[in-house]
Structures are given as C-alpha cells and as structure tokens.
C-alpha cells in the first residue's frame, strides 16, 4: 500500500469494503450497524460548540509552561524505550541490531540526548525514519520508541520556546473561533483544522479536559460496513468430491479399499457483539468399498458414512482466530461377500461378521470423526494463516507504520449479517459527529463513509508530501492500472492495455512540458463533501511551483459531481461544475495568484474528468459463486456517502460437452 497510489484512494474507499470482508435483500431499509457498545475513547460529555469556544478563551489564563522536570521525565521514558528496542533487536541477532541502529542514526541520537541542549532537528530526522514503509517498523517496540520520541521532541520544543504561553494562547483563540464557525456552519474541513490544533494542545499537556470534550463531540465512527448473511454464505461455500485410499484397522482386523467423499462446505454466522462469529460446516457422505483379509478368509463390504463437521471462526481487528473442530458421523455397512475355503468356514465367518458389526460401525464412525476434525483443522489452519498474513502485510502493518491504523475497528454478528464499525482518526484528527441515514433497502453489501474518513486516510499517505508533474502523471497511470474496478473517463480512457498506453503517453508529455509541483497539505491533502445528492472531490496544497516561480499559499482544487447507478451495476459520476481553484486564506488575488489559479484549473481538468464510470467490482480473491459486486445505490447526504451493492453469481450450463460459466445477476 504505497503513497504513490493517492489518486485511487477515493475509489479504493468506495470499493475496498466490498472486496475486503467476506438479511438477504428485502424491502426494509438498511441502517448502519449500531455502535452503542463500541468503546472509542473515554471522553467527557460535550456541550454546544459555542460553549466550548467560551471555555477555551477562559482557559487561556490557565496555560502552563512546559517545565524542565516534565521534559526530563519524557527523556527518561524515551531512553527506557530505547533500551527496550535494543534488547528486542539484540535477540534477533547482532547483524539486525547493527543495521537498525545505522538506519535510525543511533549514534547521533545518543549524542544529542547526552548534550545539554539537544538538536531537535536531528531527533526529528530519526522520527521521520520511524514513519517509513519498512518491514518491522510496525512492531510494538518500534511503535513504543516512536511515541516516546515524539512526546520528548514536542515537550522539549515547547520548553525551549520563550513565547510558549503567548503562542499557545493564540492557538486557543484560533480554536475558539473555529468552534464558533463550526457551530454556525459545520464543515468537515474546518473540523479537520480543529483536530490538528487539538493534537498540538494535547502534546503540550495543557487543556486536557477541553480537548477531551471536543473529541467527545466528534470522536464517533466515520465508516460502517454491513454484509448480509447470504453474501457470507455464498462467498465461502464450495463443493467437495474426492477419492482416497482406505487402510485401517477396525475391531482388530485390517481393512483396505477406497473411499469416495461427496459433500459441501458452507459457512454460517453466529451471534456475537464483540467480534464476528462464523462457523464452517462440512456435511456429506463417504461411500467406501473395502475388503478385510484375515488368514484364509476375506470379507468384502460396502459402507455409507453420513457426517457433519464444524469449525468456529472469530474475526476481530487482529485478524482471524479458530476454535476447536467437532464432528459427528454414523456408519451403515453391508457385507457383499465372503471368500473362504469351504462352506463351514464361510458360515462361521458370517456369524462373526454379524456379531462384530455394531462394534465395527461404532469404531469406524469414531475414526471418521477424528479424521474429519484433523483434516478440517489442517486445512483451515493454512487458510487462516494465509488470510492473516495478507491482512497483516497489506493492511495492518503498513497502516501501523504510518500511524494510520483505525483507532476503532470493530466486527460483530448481532444478527444474520456481518457488521464493521471503524474510526479513522489519530491524535491530530477528528471523526464524525453524526450517524448516517439508512439506505432505501437492504443490500448484500452496504457501506457508509463520512467525509472525515477520506481526509484522515489521505493524510496518512499524502500529508506534507511534494509531487512534481511527472510523478503526478505516473500516479494517474498507476491508478488506472491498479484500480480494483474499470474506471472509464469522458475521454475514453479506461483500465486496460489501451488505457495504460494512453497514460504512458501522458507521462511522456508531462516530461516535456514546463515542470510544476504541488506540496500537499498535512491536514486534508484529499477531501470530499457528501451532501444534497452531490459528491465534491478535491485536493489541498500549501505550496505550488511552476518553472522557477512558486507560491506558498493554501489552495483547494475541487470539482462537484452528480452520482447515479446504471442498470449494468456501474457507478456514474457526472461533473456538475467547472474545476474550482480556491485560495483559502486570501480575499484578494494578485497577478501571480491569478496566473497560478488558471494554470492549476487547466492541469487538474484531466484529473476531474467530465464523466467517470466505475464498473462493477470484481473480487480480488476467490469468493465461491460470487462473480461481481454491482453498484445499486449511492446516496450522498449530511456529510455521509451511503453505498449499496448486490452480488452477482456464476451459474453453470452444459455446452459442447463441457461446463462453462455464465454471468447472471442474483
């Protein structure tokens, strides 16, 4: 998950929940999962924002300077975390320890901490390295070290500022002003600025109660997912048909032959509120044909084993866990013949077979149960290991390394559906203040995204980064190539060989044109507005260059789209406005600003195409009978985007003596 893919962030957020998780469609409305039991953070009850603004102004007189004792305590915590990290790396070998120390500028770090006045810029360089996308930086000891280093650098910087109290007072005034603006006309972009200030205040260990109250107002989940039980069952079902040899000992006699197993593996949802409870069920029959040689007598028989095996699974923010397998089986056997040297021996053997039959069937059933549980444990263990590895490597670890893993990620199966509730917001961010409204009906997959999820997620990968025109063109090409859907723009570009060729041509054109660049905002590099049936998509930059010229002004570049779904299950975005370029902090523009505004509007016209068609979503892994996810509803309203998708399935039909797959909507 690389930051170079910034252009596909919005599309991935639309599609990701569909392919990531695995009551049927009805007439009832679909509401987002209830989150009353999801513990986000302890926070004091928040009053109206205007009251909070007044409290911030009043609290200016209570701002305390950062003391040397507090900095010393933070330094001690940092040094302790360094010892813990060194011990952890030492257990991994001297080569690993030396390599990591070299990467983290360890000698310079220790020298600065030993100095009377450390160079915080050097410590900042170490901190930046801890946010890189390198394997291992997501480990707990690295995260502990990063947190301690960040706390020390922040407090040491405040302590060295002679105007700290005055400067912090200005921050309080800014927060109070923004809270009043938010009370009068709430916007997610304004809330993002407030969240950034709150992180700054909290880092100085001032205003803890005020910060908690504002967060209590905004720290609500900003994305929800709801996946029907029918979808989960369809995505995890498969047919089993295999043959295997038989070589066993039953009631003291060797039994050899062959067994033919036919059955179905299906999944179902349990009922749980603190995790998602799933159960794999394997039911079927085993037809066996065996012989049991014993000295001069051989008994031939057929058997029918009816069985049912199950495996409980649990899903939470750490991945999948498995419970113990269980199985039940019953065996019904029939003797088809006895080979013996004479009638008397055959008669005696027949009586012995009849006598031992109940015990033999009981023993065969128990052994079948053991084999079923062992096979189910072995197969699911590998599948769970693979699933957790993909989740850890592709989702959890990269986000932890960038301080972007959701603060809350809760799974539940309170009814016949799998619910996902999430909050994407770290210490300098806020979530939502409201819950989304429901969709028109229940869908196989229902998703709700708040505007803050877009901005907060993009901050993790784009915040403060600079990209030139060639890199921007390359990212456009990567977005077309790597998107989980086909994206068709108004000029005919779409994912595929033709699109890649056209995007490559655009990269070459950009290399020949006048160079330009954008430095993304560290607060809201990407933003979205969902309201009144419209979607606004935009980027925010704080520095722009063109040739030798540059401006250090905050600009927001955006376009508004109408959104609809098509009969083919596509999502259609139609631009309803020209590309808008706004100088956020300037009321009047000079000639240079006007020239940049015109230039950027032209450059971003390709990004914000007149029409964008997002195809139905193809699962990124095998999901049983499911072929595609079809967009059926898109409702932007009240800062939330609600999305409803139904699945389509493969069906088989004979054609020219073979089985083919056709595409049919469920």
Image (spheres, grey):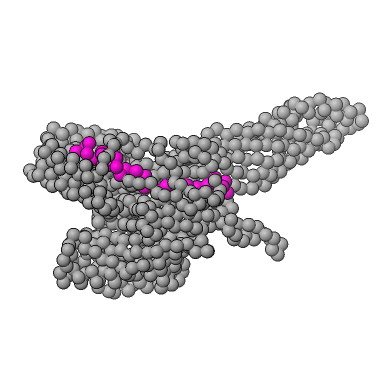
Q: Position of residue 324 (x, y in %)?
A: 55, 32
Could you tell me which quadrant the C terminus lies in? bottom right
Look at the picture and state if 563 lies above or below 308.
below
Towards the viewer: 116 or 59: 59
Residue at point 31% right, 53% down?
Answer: 455
Q: Residue at x 56, y 56 (%)?
A: 648
**Eyeballing the image, is 70 above or below 643?**
above
325 vs 111, left or right, is: right
Helix, strand or loop: magenta stretch = helix
- The residue furthest left is 162
Q: Is residue 194 above or below residue 341?
A: below
Q: Is residue 560 visible?
A: yes
Q: Depth check: 345 or 118 in front?
A: 118
Image coordinates for residue 22, horizontal then vertical, percent: 51, 47
Is 181 left or right of 68, judged from the image as shown?
right
Q: Which residues are magenta?
A: 207-235
Residue at x-position 19% and y-position 38%: 207
Q: Residue furthest right?
A: 343
Q: Which of the 4 quarters of the picture holds residue 602?
A: bottom left
Is 138 or 111 nearer to us in this picture?
A: 138
Q: Position of residue 159 (x, y in %)?
A: 12, 40
User: Which residue is rendered at x = 74% and y = 30% of the image?
Assistant: 361
Q: How many marks?
A: 0
Query: Residue 142: x percent and y percent?
Result: 30, 40
Q: In this orientation, does residue 469 appear? A: no
**247 part of magenta stretch:** no
Image quadrant of residue 408? top left
The image quadrant that residue 343 belongs to is top right
């Amino acid at each position: 998950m690389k930051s170079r893919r910034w252009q596909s962030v919005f599309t991935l957020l639309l599609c990701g929940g569909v392919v990531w998780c695995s009551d049927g469609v009805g007439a009832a409305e679909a509401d987002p999962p209830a989150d009353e039991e999801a513990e986000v953070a302890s926070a004091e009850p928040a009053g109206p924002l205007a009251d909070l603004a007044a409290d911030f102004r009043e609290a200016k007189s209570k701002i305390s300077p950062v003391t040397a004792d507090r900095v010393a305590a933070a330094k001690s915590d940092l040094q302790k975390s360094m010892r813990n990290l060194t011990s952890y790396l030492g257990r991994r070998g001297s080569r690993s320890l030396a390599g990591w120390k070299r990467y983290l500028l360890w000698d310079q770090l220790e020298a600065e901490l030993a100095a009377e006045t450390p160079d915080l810029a050097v410590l900042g360089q170490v901190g930046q390295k801890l946010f890189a996308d390198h394997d291992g930086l997501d480990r707990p000891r690295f995260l502990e070290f990063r947190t301690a280093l960040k706390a020390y650098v922040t407090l040491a910087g405040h302590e060295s500022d002679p105007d700290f109290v005055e400067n912090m007072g200005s921050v309080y005034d800014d927060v109070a002003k923004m809270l009043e603006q938010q009370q009068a006309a709430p916007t997610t972009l304004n809330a993002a600025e407030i969240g950034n200030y709150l992180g700054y205040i909290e880092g100085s260990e001032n205003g803890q109660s005020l910060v908690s109250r504002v967060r209590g107002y905004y720290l609500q989940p900003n994305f929800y997912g709801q996946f029907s039980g029918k979808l989960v069952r369809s995505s995890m079902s498969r047919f089993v048909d295999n043959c295997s040899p038989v070589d066993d000992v039953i009631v003291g006699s060797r039994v050899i032959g062959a067994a033919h197993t036919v059955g179905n593996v299906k999944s179902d949802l349990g009922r749980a509120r603190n995790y998602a409870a799933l159960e794999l069920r394997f039911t079927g029959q085993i037809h066996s044909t065996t012989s049991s040689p014993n000295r001069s007598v051989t008994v031939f028989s057929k058997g029918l084993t009816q069985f049912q095996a199950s495996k409980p699974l649990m899903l939470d923010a750490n991945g999948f866990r498995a419970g113990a397998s269980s199985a039940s089986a019953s065996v019904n056997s029939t003797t088809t013949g006895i080979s013996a040297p004479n009638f008397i021996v055959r008669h005696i053997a027949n009586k012995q077979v009849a006598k031992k039959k109940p015990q033999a069937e009981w023993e065969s059933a128990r052994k079948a149960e053991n084999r079923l549980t062992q096979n189910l444990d072995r197969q699911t263990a590998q599948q769970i290991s693979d699933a957790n590895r993909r989740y850890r490597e592709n989702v959890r670890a990269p986000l932890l390394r960038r301080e972007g893993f959701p603060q809350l990620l809760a799974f539940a199966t309170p009814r016949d559906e799998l619910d996902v509730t999430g909050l994407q917001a770290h210490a300098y961010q806020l979530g939502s203040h409201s819950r989304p409204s429901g969709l028109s009906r229940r869908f196989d997959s229902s998703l709700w995204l708040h505007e803050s999820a877009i901005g907060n997620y993009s901050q993790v990968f784009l915040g403060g980064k600079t990209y030139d025109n060639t890199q921007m063109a390359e990212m456009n090409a990567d977005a077309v190539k790597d998107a989980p859907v086909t994206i068709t723009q108004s000029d005919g570009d779409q994912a595929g060989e033709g699109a890649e060729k056209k995007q490559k041509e655009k990269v070459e054109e950009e290399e020949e044109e006048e160079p330009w660049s954008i430095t993304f905002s560290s607060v809201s590099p990407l933003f979205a507005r969902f309201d009144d049936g419209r979607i606004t998509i935009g980027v925010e930059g704080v520095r722009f260059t063109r040739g030798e010229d540059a401006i250090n002004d905050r600009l927001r570049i955006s376009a508004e789209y109408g959104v609809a779904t098509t009969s083919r299950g596509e999502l259609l975005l139609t631009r309803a406005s020209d590309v808008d370029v706004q100088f956020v902090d300037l009321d009047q523009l000079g000639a240079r600003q006007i020239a940049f505004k015109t230039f950027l509007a032209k450059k971003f016209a390709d990004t914000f195409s007149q029409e964008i068609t997002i195809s139905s979503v193809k699962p990124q892994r095998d999901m049983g009978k499911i072929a595609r996810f079809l967009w059926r509803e898109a409702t932007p309203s009240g800062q939330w985007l609600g999305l409803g998708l139904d699945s389509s399935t493969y069906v088989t039909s004979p054609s020219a003596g073979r089985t083919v797959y056709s595409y049919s909507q469920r």
